[in-house]
Image: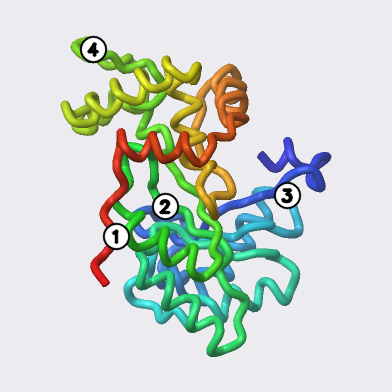
Amino acid sequence: MGELLRSRRDQVILATKFGYTNRDMGYGPVAGAKGGRAYIRIAVEASLRRLQTDHIDLYQLHAPDAVTPMAETLAALHELVLEGKVRYLGHSNLNGWQLAEAEHVARQHGFTPFISAQNRWSLLDREWEGSVRQAAEHYGVGLIPYSPLAQGLLTGTVKRGEPLPSGTKIAGSPHMVTDERLDHLDRLSAWGAEHGRSILEIAFGGLTGRPMVGTVIAGASRPQQVEANVAAAAWHPTVEDLAEIDKIVPPPAAPAY
């Protein structure tokens, strides 16, 4: 990636993460807790070296660190912004109250705040909308859904009663293929047929058309998939389109007053 970006660095927004709770990046015990200052300093220098760049546009906390105070994490990240090594900060997999806590800690201490939230979100995975989405919209934090295609279930390659396509993500996650999800998929596909939209367009547009969603993260293993994703993301649904999609795959109910 560093070789590829070296001559194009000013043409891209480079985003990466640190602090994946369940994976050792090889830094050893000296790095400490994944949200701590020691780990962050080691991780950012390693990323800059691997990516062959002098700055990261969006540096994201991969998962909440249960043992490090949010104030320490934000203080360390604020230092990176002041040093010019990082330009903006984001987080991933935080829930609603953690997002709010981070916002208040940043305000209290004058730290650079998080500007983005990356959570699992697709039209078939809408559980966290009731808390994270509302908190993000309240505090002006941009949303970057990951797994918008529900591990490949929303690509149009999965058919009821047929074997899962070999070599695909969804083939490794058969537990995600339930009757309820297939029912939703059938209804979304039928709606798309009526409106001249593919299931891929609906999967992307059903998210990017929402307020506060800046982009989506969709994996690809072939260039053709990247091209198809880009083409599908060009569709901009209307408010009426989104309302009809919500009737097919309802979001979680808003919490009681």
How crowded is the residue under tag 3: few (<14 C-alpha within 10 Å), some, or many (20+)?
some
* Residue 166, x across and y down, in percent: 32, 15
Task: Provide the secondary structure element on which disc 2 rests.
Answer: loop
Depth-wise, is mark 2 or mark 1 nearer the camera? Answer: 1
Q: Name the residue type under label 4.
A: Pro
Q: What is the image's colouring?
A: rainbow
Q: Earlier in the sequence, mark 3 or mark 4?
A: 3
Among numbered discs 2 and 1, the one appearing first in the sequence: 2
Query: In the picture, residue 130 is in which quadrant?
Result: bottom left
Q: CA distance from mark 3 to mark 2?
A: 27 Å
The single residue placed furthest to the front in the displayed view is 240
- How many angstroms separate mark 1 from mark 3 (CA)? 45 Å
Q: Above or below — where is 224 with respect to 174?
A: above
Q: Is residue 226 left or right of residue 121?
A: right
Q: Which residue type carries mark 3?
A: Gln
* Secondary element type, mark 1: loop
Kind of residue at badge 1: Ala
Residue drawn at x 79%, y 46% is 9
Mark 2 vs 4, N-terminal side: 2
Q: Amino acid at mark 2?
A: Asn
Question: Is disc 3 in contact with disc 2, using a CB cutoff of under 8 Å?
Answer: no
In this view, which residue lies farthest toward the bottom?
A: 108
Q: Which residue is mark 3?
A: 52
**Image quarter in which the N terminus is found:** top right
* Disc on res. 254: 1
Pointer 1 and pointer 3: residues touching (CB < 8 Å)? no
Instruction: Look at discs 3 and 4 and give the one toward the viewer.
Output: 4
Nearer to me, 211 or 161? 211
Kindly identify which numbered label has been placed on residue 163: 4
| Residue occupied by mark 2 | 119
